[in-house]
Image (cartoon, coloured by chain):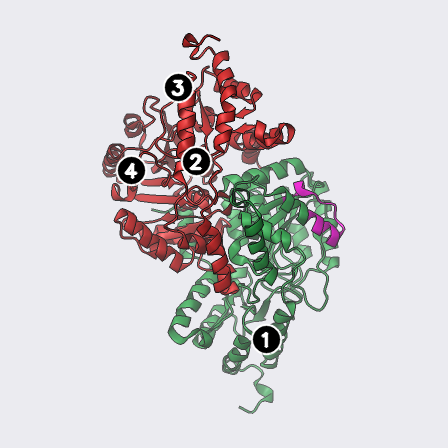
Chain colours: A red, B green
């Protein structure tokens, strides 16, 4: 009845979403406080108070027809102008409203830009481990996903393999920094090297290779680490942003694309993204939320909340003998599974009501993702379970007596 | 730079949207009060007061994390349950929350269901005149659009041609009643005949043919006319609904799909629509607005406002000698162009600052669409321009002296 492609998707549906649904089932069974759901990147810090205040103020001041009505498919001009200006102040760029397309979150934005760019058979490069949805988004437009294998020492992109896998069919490269699922921030040095490789390959093949920077986690960086703004390093850079994490609005579906004038074929790409927004059925990003984010450009999420979780979980798991690199951003920990088959480890963790996502979902088997955007108490209360897991695998047992 | 498909789209972009942008340009030039923009189906009746009240009440009562957070891709269960119950009360159906998928408007819903159903090459039948976006939506999933030519006497679907054009590759049939662009409501008799034809063809070919009812205008019916609820007439019916017109929220992008348990392969289709919502990048319908519409199920738009416009415009144009059928629903008038090339007529109307959309955009050349979801005064003030147009084409001149 349904299409062949969709049959595959339904049969191999998102492990993250499956765990999320499983979490709801277990919560109903055992009580939410006894289920440790680390499966979904659903922020646990409430939206800043300014979000609610802005909504009410907008409702009181603005005309209903303007507020809830259609606007240009790319979004309200004043909203786009405000965001452009804010980016310019923060990153020394020179964007204007014509460089912005408001989108239904970053997921909507990625679909819009891939629809705009890809001919069937065009290649899209991603670096493992990567957010599994990139595979679906690329497949939506009959693109071919090319996966660069992970560098499990640093989880920085494997640039040697990258240079080898760029071909004349490479149309886009997706990066995600701070990274889901590792929390790693790509260093400026990494970015410079990537840019140099792409410049060289563009010349060699006479093609354009677009770097798509998926940035839902831009504002979530710890220890004062800088997250380079990629349009400053490589001319053909497109940025996809989301307010899902920075303002804790994932359900509201609000974000934007930056399409700089410096892009090869900028005017065509900007016009294409406008049309793609319409014909994919988004039509426009939700109108009220466009106006809300424009008023909340200086708002920040409570990073200290996530940081406390990060320290607690990272230190706790290290102490138990688990191994993982310390994340500099986002709200994920990417932990080495004590056994090769991380699916078996996830199943065993579920017996402790601890819900993890297998690394295979991110093209990096042997690891699990722990989303620590949860209540601090969830981490504390989950620790005995993690301890039992560690023991059952014989981790860290050498210096503990029982 | 952009894909070949998108190049075509950009070059042949929506005439409706182009007129909308042109309207903004002319308004800046001549003042909004001197531009008669009949191009876009952008409601002119403000959202009911209950929308604002609901938003504020929800913000005051609900937890920010729940309110703005992720939920199941199909939407909040309580919202879906409330809508199902409301449909059951109104139409004697027996839906439950599992039959509903909340969508980013009807446009989002149509994309979700076509992504779910279509294999490349599958045929989708539409009846001219039809909303031009159906062509893009079908093309998004490599479906083949099959157009049934219009019956310009009644603008009811041409069922004789319909029966002939159904093939073993026919996967879906899209209907839109009340209709954009004609305002015609398909009669119960029409629906019964369509259903009988599809039943017969399903048997003949051993296939399933899904009837997709695109219903953004369901609540906009005049003179007490009944709009049949199609799941009651044909088993394989899928409904796509939007609150854009009924609650005047087009910018907010909120609607739903109804996927009845009676569908062939219902469970697969429901699971597929859930996955398609995710992978197309919608992820879920905007969360706050889901909760708002669930509280506004008994709200109605001010139909008398549109009805007054309908009478004024219909009677005014008839008097001037224009010819069109009287619409029973929606907020469009589909008027016969005084000259065969309706594009030339639209251009001439633009000289009067009157913005119309050519019928070719709806696969029905020789006609123009007038969206009367405008201020009443716009219609009154546009009439002298329409009069000059009528005279310039020699319409209605026989019984007037100058």
Dominant SS in magenta: helix
- The kind of secondary structure element at disc 1 is helix
> Badge 3 is on which residue?
A323
Question: Is A242 above or below relative to B252?
Answer: above
> Badge 2 is on which residue?
A134
Chain of the residue that carries numbered disc 3 in the rendered image: A
- Seen at 61% across and 49% down, the residue is B256
Q: Are marks 3 and 2 in contact (CB under 8 Å)?
A: no
Task: Out of B1 and B278, give the one closest to the viewer.
Answer: B278
> Badge 4 is on which residue?
A226
Front: mark 3 or 2: 3
Residue A214 figure quarter: top left
Task: Out of A159 and B314, give the one closest to the viewer.
Answer: A159
Q: Do the residues labelled 2 and 4 touch (CB within 8 Å)?
A: no
Are callouts 4 and 3 both on one chain? yes
- Seen at 50% across and 46% down, the residue is B140
Chain of the residue that carries numbered disc 2 in the rendered image: A
A46 with respect to A212 (left or right): right
Q: Are marks 4 and 3 in contact (CB under 8 Å)?
A: no
Nearest to N terminus: mark 2 or mark 4: 2
Residue bounds of the magenta highlight: B84-100
Nearest to N terminus: mark 4 or mark 3: 4
Picture coordinates of residue A165, whole percent (x, y): 32, 29
Question: Is A81 above or below relative to A347?
Answer: below
CA separation in Å, label 1 and label 2: 50 Å
Nearest to N terminus: mark 3 or mark 2: 2
- The kind of secondary structure element at disc 3 is loop
Front: mark 2 or 4: 4
CA separation in Å, label 3 and label 2: 27 Å
CA separation in Å, label 3 and label 1: 73 Å
């Amino acid at each position: 009845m349904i299409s062949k492609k969709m049959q595959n998707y339904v049969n191999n549906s998102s492990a993250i979403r499956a765990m999320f649904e499983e979490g709801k089932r277990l919560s109903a069974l055992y009580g939410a406080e006894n289920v440790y759901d680390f499966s979904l990147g659903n922020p646990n810090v409430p939206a800043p108070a300014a979000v609610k205040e802005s909504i009410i103020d907008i409702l009181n001041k603005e005309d209903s027809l303007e507020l809830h009505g259609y606007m240009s498919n790319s979004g309200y001009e004043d909203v786009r102008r405000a965001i452009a200006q804010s980016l310019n102040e923060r990153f020394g760029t020179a964007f204007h409203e014509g460089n912005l397309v408001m989108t239904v979150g970053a997921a909507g934005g990625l679909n819009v830009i891939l629809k705009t760019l890809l001919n069937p058979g065009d290649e899209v490069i991603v670096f493992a481990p990567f957010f599994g949805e990139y595979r679906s988004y690329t497949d939506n437009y009959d693109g071919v996903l090319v996966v660069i294998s992970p560098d499990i020492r640093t989880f920085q992109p494997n640039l040697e393999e990258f240079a080898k896998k760029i071909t004349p069919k490479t149309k886009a490269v997706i990066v995600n920094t701070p990274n889901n699922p590792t929390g790693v921030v790509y260093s400026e040095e990494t970015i410079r090297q990537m840019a140099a490789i792409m410049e060289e390959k563009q010349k060699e093949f006479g093609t354009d290779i677009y770097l798509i920077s998926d940035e839902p986690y831009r504002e979530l960086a710890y220890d004062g680490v800088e997250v380079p703004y990629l349009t400053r390093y490589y001319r053909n850079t497109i940025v996809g942003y989301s307010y899902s994490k920075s303002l804790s609005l994932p359900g509201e579906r609000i974000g934007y694309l930056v399409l700089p004038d410096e892009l090869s074929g900028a005017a065509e790409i900007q016009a294409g993204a406008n049309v793609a927004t319409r014909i994919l059925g988004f039509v426009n990003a939700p109108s009220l939320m466009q106006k809300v984010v424009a008023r909340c450009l200086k708002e920040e999420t409570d990073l200290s909340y996530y940081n406390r979780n990060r320290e607690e979980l990272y230190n706790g798991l290290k102490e138990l003998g688990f191994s993982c690199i310390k994340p500099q951003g986002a709200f994920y920990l990417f932990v080495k599974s004590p056994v090769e088959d991380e699916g078996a480890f996830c199943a065993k963790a579920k017996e402790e009501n601890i819900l993890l996502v297998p690394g295979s979902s991110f093209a990096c088997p042997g690891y699990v993702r722990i989303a620590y955007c949860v209540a601090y108490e969830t981490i504390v209360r989950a620790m005995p379970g993690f301890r039992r897991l560690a023991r059952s695998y014989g981790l860290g047992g050498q210096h503990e007596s029982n």
